[in-house]
Amino acid sequence: MNVDTLTDIWYQGSVQAHDFISPDYWHSKIKDMRDQYIPMSETYVIYDQSEIAGFVSMVDDYLAALFIHPHYQGNGYGKELLNFIKGQKSKASLKVYKKNESAVRFYERNGFVIKEMLLDENTKHEELLMEWEE
């Protein structure tokens, strides 16, 4: 697994999905993502032929990241990764920005329910804490 490739997918996906947050913010987090967050997570990748199409990272029962490269979005890879995690865990939680409506709908369609509204101290944007249980 190439951490730089995963970091690039995370960065491109973050900028695309969060147009309400400056790309400079995401750029400032690249080193942390590459050197800290991905290595500390249990990460699984999904391939389209020999290319990494996306990945999911878990920290215990917390879904820390689920990103599909923009080129491969809409092909069911996100759902496939989520179903893989559901096969490994009996419950999972995550945080998603409220303004990222397509992601909120995706998680709701896949059995996650909104539990709480939070404020991301770094970006000052509202986040939803969502949970799924078997």
Image (cartoon, helix red, strand yellow):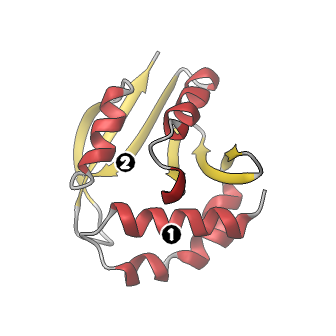
Question: Where is mark 2, residue-wise?
Answer: 95
Report the number of numbered marks. 2
When the figure is inspected, residue 131 is found, relative to residue 10, above or below; the finding is above
Q: Quadrant of residue 9?
A: bottom right
Whether residue 111 is visible: yes
Mark 2: which amino acid? Lys
Q: Position of residue 82 (x, y in %)?
A: 52, 33
At horizontal 49% and vertical 33% (from top left) the residue drawn is 79
Who's the residue at 46% across and 62% down the image? 13
* Residue 115 horizontal/vertical position (percent): 26, 34
Dot in front, 2 or 1? 1
Q: Which callout, 2 or 1, points at the residue further toward the start of the chain?
A: 1
Could you give the CA–CA distance between mark 2 and mark 1, rounded to whole angstroms?
17 Å
> Which is nearer the eye, 122 or 77?
77
Q: 115 above or below 40?
A: above
Q: Where residue 108 sits in the image (x, y, percent)?
A: 30, 31
Picture coordinates of residue 63 (x, y %)?
51, 43
**Residue 44 in view:** no
* Residue nearest the viewer, comparing 52 with 10: 52
Q: Quadrant location of the N terminus?
A: bottom right
Tag 1 residue: 11
Instruction: Please determine whether, in this image, residue 12 is positioned above or below residue 29.
Output: above
